[in-house]
Amino acid sequence: MPRVTNFSVFVKSGRKMKFMTDAKFGSDTNTQQIVVDGDVVYTDAVGTSSATINAAICVEGHDSSQSVEDAHLRNETVKVTWGIVDGRIYAADYKIKTMEFDTKAADGTLTGSFTLIGGKLSKVAG
């Protein structure tokens, strides 16, 4: 029977987002269809990628979430690696576009949500 598991997220210097609760990432070729003189042509555009990472934020802090927060505040570019997706590992350089925090007093939780925008996604293994 095939094994199913969530993928791991690594930021900056290979720090695993240990307290990630959920995430999604994807890519866009940005190709455009143009209809000209009864013909259809396609542009060769520059690929981009985007992602959202949601994580539990620890009271004492944690390297991976703090490095994402710091990158956002400094408007730095960070390398994010996504693995393993069906035996493959993907990576791209991202800017942390938005950072939001949500707390719930009833159950004492603090979560963070990070929206990333980046360049073309590349397959680095698999």
Image: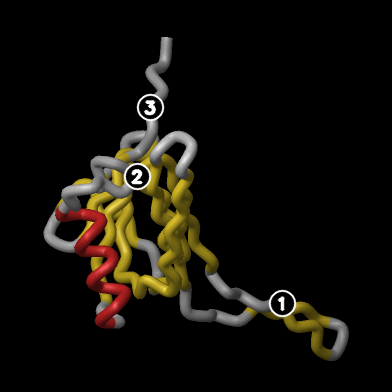
Residue 18 locus on image (x, y percent): 24, 41
Q: How is the image coloured?
A: secondary structure
Write the residue at 53% across / 69% down: 29
In the picture, the disc for residue 117 is none
Residue 100 falls left or right of residue 125: right
User: Mark 1 belongs to which amino acid?
Assistant: Gln
Q: Relative to the observer, which residue lies in front, 36 or 3?
A: 3
Where does label 3 land, which residue?
Answer: 5
Residue 106: horizontal and vertical position, in percent? Answer: 49, 37
Q: Secondary structure at mark 3?
A: loop
Real-space Cα separation, disc 3 to disc 1, in angstroms: 37 Å
Q: Amino acid at mark 3?
A: Thr
Q: Quadrant of residue 75?
A: bottom left
Amino acid type assigned to the residue bearing label 2 in the image: Ala
Picture quadrant of residue 21: top left
Residue at horizontal 25 percent and vertical 81 percent from the top: 74
Q: Earlier in the sequence, mark 3 or mark 2?
A: 3
Classify 10 Å Cα crowding around label 2: few (below 14), some (14-19), many (20 and above). Answer: many
Q: Which residue is mark 1?
A: 33
Task: Report the residue that reaches farthest toward the bottom.
Answer: 37
**Number of numbered markers:** 3
Image quarter where the C terminus lies is top left
Q: CA distance from mark 3 to mark 2?
A: 19 Å
Residue drawn at point x = 32 percent, y = 53 percent: 90
Find the residue positioned furthest to the right. 38
Quickly name the residue at label 2: 56
Using the image as rendered, state which of residue 62 and residue 79 is in the foreground. Answer: 62
